[in-house]
Image: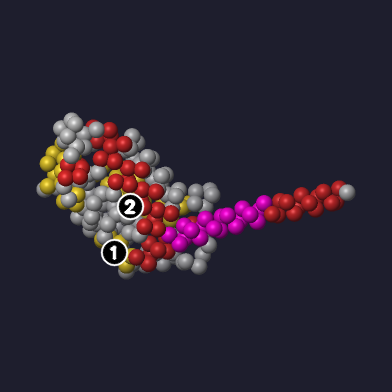
Amino acid sequence: MAEGREFLLFVALTMVFSSSVIVQEALGNSEGDALHALRRSLSDPDNVLQSWDPNLVNPCTYFHVTCNQDNRVTRLDLGNSNLSGHLVPELGKLEHLQYLELYKNNIQGTIPSEIGNLKSLISLDLYNNNISGTIPPSLGNLKSLVFLRLNDNQLTGPITRALTNISSLKVVDVSNNNLCGTIPTTGPFEHIPLNNFENNPRLEGPELLGLASYDTNCS
């Protein structure tokens, strides 16, 4: 009888372990697929992404990728890597990502609205690229965001007021773009220095209280 109970316990533990492995592999495949989509969209003359093998289940083995103890991707460190190309919406699948570091490359195109799905994101560093289009209002969903550096790009349109609702935001730099309208003065923007908005020829200075209409009136 005791042997029977031990056997059933062994079977149960095996099933639990197998289920855990299957879940981890599914998560790894999802995040690996997202990183592979990014790799396909980028030109990489220095082969910094050479280790990003789509046939590997676990993307935590990739260079420039950091994972937590649950093998979920938490950092992408690809700053100053001589990359060009564009960002991809699949980045929004990296649900545990905390640091997206792609500064000082030659990335073009727009910021995907799906970046707003990265609820754990602390730092979004896309400065010194050639990114165009507007700042997506979906970035206002990044309630853990502390650092937002989009300076030295080709961004247009207003500074979305959705960012004023991020209480954790400490650093915002959108200087050297082509933004228009006024500079928000509420929420975290109350403490952002004005030189972080300079060299936007169409930006008209801090907004007056109660006058935020430039959020939609410029393009």
Give the residue at x 16% y 45%. 217
Residue at numbered disc 1: 84
Residue 153 seen in the current view = no
Find the residue positioned furthest to the top. Answer: 209
Q: Residues within 10 Å of mark 1 (few under 14, many from 20)?
A: some
Q: Residues within 10 Å of mark 2 (few under 14, many from 20)?
A: some
Residue at numbered disc 2: 113
* Prevailing secondary structure class for the magenta stretch in the rendered image: helix
How far is the residue under mark 1 from the one under mark 2? 20 Å
Q: Helix, strand or loop at disc 2?
A: helix
Q: Magenta residues?
A: 16-34
Front position in the image: 175 or 50: 175
Residue 107 in the image: state x and y as whole percent: 27, 60
Front position in the image: 162 or 25: 162
Residue 151 in the image: state x and y as whole percent: 22, 49
Residue 28 seen in the current view = yes
Q: Is residue 45 left or right of residue 57?
A: left
Amino acid type at image mark 1: Ser
Front position in the image: 71 or 21: 21
Q: Is residue 17 magenta?
A: yes
Image mark for residue 141: none
Amino acid type at image mark 2: Ser
